[in-house]
Image (spheres, rainbow, N blue to C red):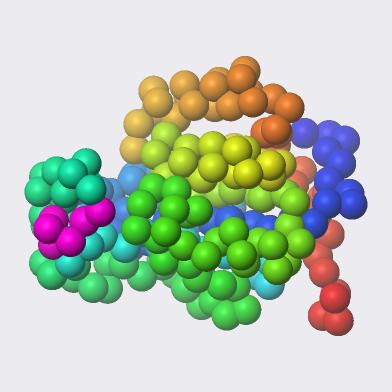
Amino acid sequence: MPGLDLTPRRMVHLCVDMQKMFAEETEWRTPWMERVLPVVTEIAERHAADTIFTRFIPPASPDEAAGVGWRAYFERWRSFTTERMDPDLIELVEPLRRLAPPAETLDKPAFSPFSGTDLGRRLQERKADTLVITGAETDVCVLAAVLSAVDLGYFVVLPKDALCSSSDETHDALLKLYAGRFSQQVVFTDAESLLRAWPQRSAAA
């Protein structure tokens, strides 16, 4: 997007759920993740100190899930409870994992990274007012992150080539929804334009 102006905003890159459980050959695999990983990596490498990686952490068992909705969900997906799944699947994919630190990692129990976490405090400490949101999936956890951020008053930047889903149809529908209904609070761009408009911080900053 030529002319993207992000000054003088205080920006944080919120990278959502780029984890092995969604990248490898599991029932939760997101095939597009491999395609967008180089783009997400470039953003995270350029702004590692301003990046927070989220990880979705399932409960140990359905009985330990919060509420009847999540309990029913993990009855269906019992193989993804932590008492049954390979714990390595929770980890971030490479090369993102190697960027933390200086990037931060935030573990979350639900779709939204603001639910049951200290993300709000972390962003306040950074005096952030704008979130660059990337990752998986456009129509699930990214959706929850965007709506929570908008409700809390953050300006949201979505680089379209750094988002992925397992469904073309709902990915495309969500992009239209964001653009059509949240155009005052959400801006679309691509990674190249974003990186031009968001200069790297100096080591002393």
For the record, the magenta segment spans: 61-66
What is the number of callouts on the image?
A: 0
Q: Residue at x 44, y 48 (%)?
A: 112
**Residue 40 place in picture, x, y as percent:** 57, 55
Question: Residue 64, percent across and down?
Answer: 18, 61
Where, quadrant-wise, is the N terminus in this rendering?
top right
Residue 199's image quarter? bottom right
The answer to whether residue 1 is left or right of residue 157 is right
Which residue in the rendered view is the most extreme toward the front? 67
Q: Say whether residue 64 is magenta.
A: yes
Could you say which is closer to the camera, residue 125 or residue 93? 125
Name the residue at 89% across, 52% down. 8
Q: Is residue 88 above or below residue 141?
A: below
Give the image location of residue 95, x and y in percent: 49, 70
Q: Is residue 191 magenta?
A: no
Q: Is residue 105 left or right of residue 107?
A: right
Between 82 and 65, the one lying in front of the other is 65
Question: Where is residue 128 shown, x and y percent of the image?
Answer: 73, 57
Asked if 48 appears above or below 8 in the picture, the reply is: below
Q: Residue at x 36, y 52 (%)?
A: 110
Indicate whether 132 appears above or below 127.
Answer: above
Q: Is residue 35 visible?
A: no
Instruction: Tell me if 12 is positioned left or right of 15 in this view.
Output: right
Residue at the location (85% across, 76% down)?
Answer: 205
Q: Is residue 37 visible?
A: yes
Q: Quadrant of residue 181?
A: top right
